[in-house]
Image (tube, helix red, strand yellow):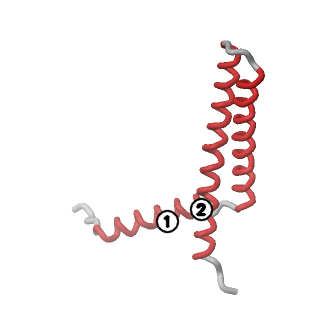
Amino acid sequence: MSPQHNDEDLDTTNNQQKTTRFQRFAAVPLDQLFKKFRAGVIYFFVGGMMIYMANVSLEPSIKQELVMLGGLLLGGLGFILAITAQFRMVLARIYFFFNKQDD
């Protein structure tokens, strides 16, 4: 005889796993997330300045296009880093708000 699984037990196990994953995702210290956000903003700004400076100071050429491509990649990486850190900061604040311990 094989043991029978109850659907409610499986749902409870799945919900516990999702909650645990979310807790690990959201329970990152805010100072660590802010450092990632700040790094993303800096990368984004430097990428934007690279694009601007290449457009203003370099003659139209392959070199200008490559510098602009580098700035675009750096700026895009910075944007993705900043927006994901901001998203996690919001989730962490919501998580800490609803799960704070009453002393």
Give the vertical position of 82 relative to 61 (above or below). below
Q: According to the image, label 2 marks what residue?
A: 26
Q: What is the crowding at mark 1: few (fewer than 14 residues within 10 Å), some, or many (at least 20)?
A: few
Q: According to the image, label 1 marks what residue?
A: 19
- Residue under the image location 67 percent in, 41 percent down: 78
Q: Earlier in the sequence, mark 2 or mark 1?
A: 1
| Residue 96, position as x, y percentages in the image | 63, 71
Q: CA distance from mark 2 to mark 1?
A: 10 Å
Image quarter of residue 93: bottom right
Horizontal arrangement in the rendering, residue 10 relative to residue 100 (left or right): left
Give the vertical position of 99 relative to 27 (above or below). below
- Residue under the image location 67 percent in, 25 percent down: 68
Amino acid type at image mark 2:
Ala
Mark 1 residue element? helix
- Residue under the image location 70 percent in, 86 percent down: 103
Amino acid type at image mark 1:
Thr
Quarter in which the N terminus is drawn? bottom left
